[in-house]
Image (cartoon, rainbow, N blue to C red):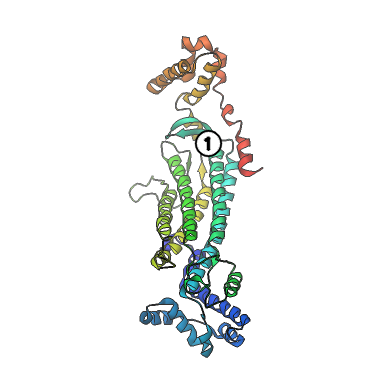
Amino acid sequence: MIPRYARPEMTAIWDPQSKFRIWFEIEAHACDAQAKLGVIPEAAAKAVWERGNFDIDRIDEIERETKHDVIAFLTNLAEYVGDEARFVHQGMTSSDVLDTCLSVQLTKACDILLADMDALLAALKAKAYAHKDDVCVGRSHGIHAEPVTFGLKMAQAYAEFDRNRERLVNARKDIATCAISGAVGTFANIDPYVEEHVAASLGLTPEPASTQVIPRDRHAMFFATLGVIASSIERLAVEIRHLQRTEVLEAEEYFAPGQKGSSAMPHKRNPVLTENLTGLARLVRMATIPAMENVALWHERDISHSSVERGIGPDATITLDFALARLTGVIEKLVVYPENMLRNMNKLGGLIHSQRVLLALTQAGVSREDSYRLVQRNAMRVWREGADFMELLKADDEVMKALSAEQIESVFDLEYHTKHVDTIFRRVFGE
């Protein structure tokens, strides 16, 4: 991922220095286990830890000849270790190193993403409580529906990201596996204890049945989870973008002193951060289909998945990390306009209370079909003429046969729509 959309801590997981260090630790821990089993001398395992090292430029130089990255690494490692290097990688195959390393990298990435999620959840919770009772119009199909509160919008987002956090915890558990089982995964040339030892040393669990590679259904689920989280980011970003439209302006991204919105129009304040988040979400989701296609490898293994994962592993995690941090900043600094919410809600002359009028008529003995006809007849006049809905109802003889003026006025109470906000908050936040 380009530096513009990358943060250092996540990027560091995927740089060559980090990758080769993990490779070294896998090989060194495997040597420790082999020494305990008596397969190699203890002095050899000790030599790997004491003298083992690598040089990235040298590895690249060797790989240009060998056309094999793991062999290039082992050759370079041997240049540091010396004669004892003949005991390194005994009974292992390249996938033992590559797949276990990828598991370590993805679990480390998960830990950063989980911290990102915690920060976002805290920001959403704070914003939800700050605006719990700020009434705004709810919209379906982009059209005014019935009143909600801005706090509820934030609480709904919180609940969604709380579910995503749980999915990410499960994805981390699913991906944190280790395979040190040798060619075609049979342990023919290496004891299963080595896998158990390496797994414990790296904070992983042994893969129950590898086929020389860790089964890629695990990776598919991992990247699918990242895709779902990205979609949730986009959903909230799109909501903010809509609310910032000039005709709406119920909330907007913070516009910093000195910030410029347009090279041509000095008045512009554009939702650039949430538009950016929409684009970044597309990039993260882009990884999901290739990850699923990686599941179907030939027989015990092929390497058609390898080039895909070298790309989507860093790109999806780095991008999602950046997007979560950016969204957290947007929510923390989001500017909310309760007065504009009330003004927008009153644009349609009370039409947002049409369902309550409908229900009042049915409860007064009017059939649902006739009730709908009476309400819609008056509602359409509000759309056409800009009239006041309540006054039209009071002037409608058929309506007044069923309802008194006081009964009509009583159904235009905003608090009716917010009476269960506290219940929803208790369900979401557990307080």
Which amino acid type is marked by label 1?
Pro
Residue 354 rendering spot, x and y as whole percentages: 49, 23
The answer to whether residue 256 of the structure is visible from this angle is: no
Residue 428 rendering spot, x and y as whole percentages: 60, 42
Pick the front one: 65 or 302: 302
Question: How many numbered callouts?
Answer: 1
Position above or below: 290 against 13: above
Picture quarter with the C terminus: top right
Residue 198 rendering spot, x and y as whole percentages: 58, 73
The answer to whether residue 178 of the structure is visible from this angle is: yes
Within 10 angstroms of label 1, few (less than 14), some, or many (20 or more) residues? Answer: some
Position above or below: 71 against 105: below
Picture quarter with the N terminus: bottom left
Residue furthest right in the image: 431
Q: Image check: 309 left or right of 425? A: left
**Disc 1 target residue:** 338
Position above or below: 431 against 383: below
Residue positioned 63% across, 81% down in the render: 36
Residue 64 rendering spot, x and y as whole percentages: 36, 80
Local secondary structure at mark 1: helix
Pick the front one: 134 or 224: 224
Residue furthest bottom in the image: 83
